[in-house]
Structures are given as C-alpha cells and as structure tokens.
Image: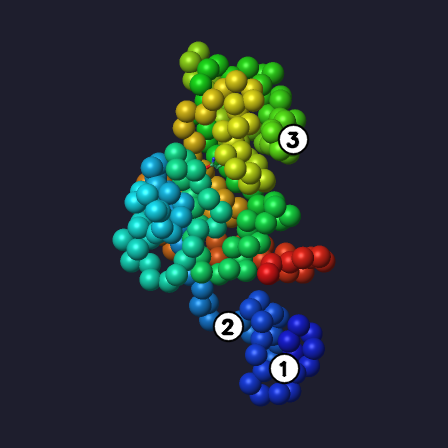
Amino acid sequence: MRVGGRVVRELGTSVDDGARVEVDGRIVRPAETRTYVVLNKPVGVMTTMRDPEGRRTVADLVRRAGVEARVVPVGRLDYDTSGVLLLTDDGDTANVLTHPRFGVEKTYRATLRGRLEPAAVEKILRGVRLDEGRAAPAQLRVVAVRRDVSQVDITIHEGRNRQVRRMFEVVDHPVLALVRLRFGPISLGDLAPGAVRPATDRERAALHRIAAEARDEPGPGPS
Ligand code: URA
C-alpha cells in the first residue's frame, strides 16, 4: 500500500482525511462519511446554529428537514439575503471554501434601486473602494434596467461582510433584494425557499476536487 506516494507496510496505519491511498497501484477511496446539504436560505433566517435573540436559524431548517449530521454553514448570508447555503460536517472542505486564498466564486442576483447607468457598471467591473480597501473586480451581467429598479447578476470571489450591498451603496444603487444563485459548484436551481437537499454526486466530487487542489498547493492549506 502507498499513502501519499510512500510505501506503508504496517497494519492499522491511520491515514489523514483526503490522503491518496493506493493498493496494488489502484487508488482506493473510503466510503463517503461526510454530509453535504444545500439549503435555500429564506430572508429572515440567521446563518448561525443558535441565536441568543431567538430568531429562526439555518439549524432549525436543516433539523426540520431531518438532517442528523452535525453540519454547520459554510460561510454566511445576511439575515436579509436568501439563496444557496452549503452546510457540512466536513471541516477541511469548509475551511478551503471560505478561505480568501482559494477565491471560490459566488453569484448573486441583486435587485437595485434606480436605473443602472453604464458608468456605475464600469466602476463595479473595475472594483469599487470599500472602507477596508478596494474590492476585487467583479463580473456583472445586467438582467433588467428600468426607471426605478434594475437587476444584475454579480459574481465575486471575495467574501467580505455585506460585500455586495456595500459595493452597490458606493455607486448609489442600494440593494433592495439579494439572492445567492451559486456558491462554487453549487447552484440554487429550483430549490424552494426553506427547502434542503443533499449535494449531488457531481457537486460533492467538485467540492472534493477544490479541497484536493488546495491541499496540493504550497503554503497553508486547510487546517
Ligand atoms: N454580500 C452581501 O452583501 N450579503 C450577503 O449576504 C452576501 C454577499
């Protein structure tokens, strides 16, 4: 048997999560023991497991859906944001997905006050200045522009606090509603608000690929 390329002969050798294990030249994988679920977080729900003020939390929703594993949210959505939220009990993968260094892409549908002009779009594309420093350039797709209200899909790879709302504040188009459509390889699709589904095999494979790539990078990988 080889573990991470090194020959191992001792019986009962324990192996780190995610290590490459080969027996007779073939890669063997342990049965999946981790849980990954996708929630469409509704507006008015806290992205925490417990709220001292007694507000509804994502924990209430996953428990109600019958998820028994001790999953926690990967990153967070504001109280007034809805959409894709991944929850897992796989701490390593969660760390990678939220670490700024690995820049997982997130796409949001933002409904904005006012008629969005090309100059504002340009600023967002270039990266606006926020209090703590310039936001990285974003990708933007204009969905609709009307006199009082506009809609865009914005893709960012940072995860600063209330980032999308603050970016549009800077260009004088406050966000009226925000829905996360995609988190890395996971899309919202037609999941109803408050509903929970298991990640698909394809999504899980993509999550593992991201974690494995991070592990192979030099420097601090997942803890
Ligand atoms: N950006 C925000 O402003 N809010 C969120 O919930 C997520 C991204």
Residue type at numbered disc 1 = Met
Above or below, 104 against 1 in this view is above
Label ID, residue 1: 1
Question: In this view of the protein, can residue 78 be seen by the observer?
Answer: yes
**Pointer 3: residues within 10 angstroms few (<14), some, or many (20+)?**
few
Above or below, 82 against 114 in this view is below
> Helix, strand or loop at disc 1?
loop
Above or below, 146 against 164 in this view is above
Determine the CA span between mark 2 and mark 3. Answer: 43 Å
* Quadrant position of the C terminus in the picture: bottom right
- Most extreme residue toward the front, as rendered? 52
Q: Is 1 displayed left or right of 38 in the figure?
A: right
x, y percent for residue 14? 57, 79
x, y percent for residue 131? 60, 29
User: Which badge, 1 or 3, comes first in the chain's sequence?
Assistant: 1
Determine the CA span between mark 1 and mark 3. Answer: 49 Å
Closest to the observer: 23 or 170? 170
* Quadrant position of the N terminus in the picture: bottom right
Determine the CA span between mark 2 and mark 1. Answer: 14 Å
Label ID, residue 134: 3
**Colour theme:** rainbow
- At a point 63% along the width and 27% down the height, the residue shown is 129
Please name the residue that numbered disc 2 is placed on.
Answer: 30
Which numbered mark, 2 or 3, is in the foreground of this view? 3
Q: Is mark 1 within 8 Å of ligand 1?
A: no
- At a point 40% along the width and 45% down the height, the residue shown is 47
Question: In this view of the protein, can residue 82 be seen by the observer?
Answer: no
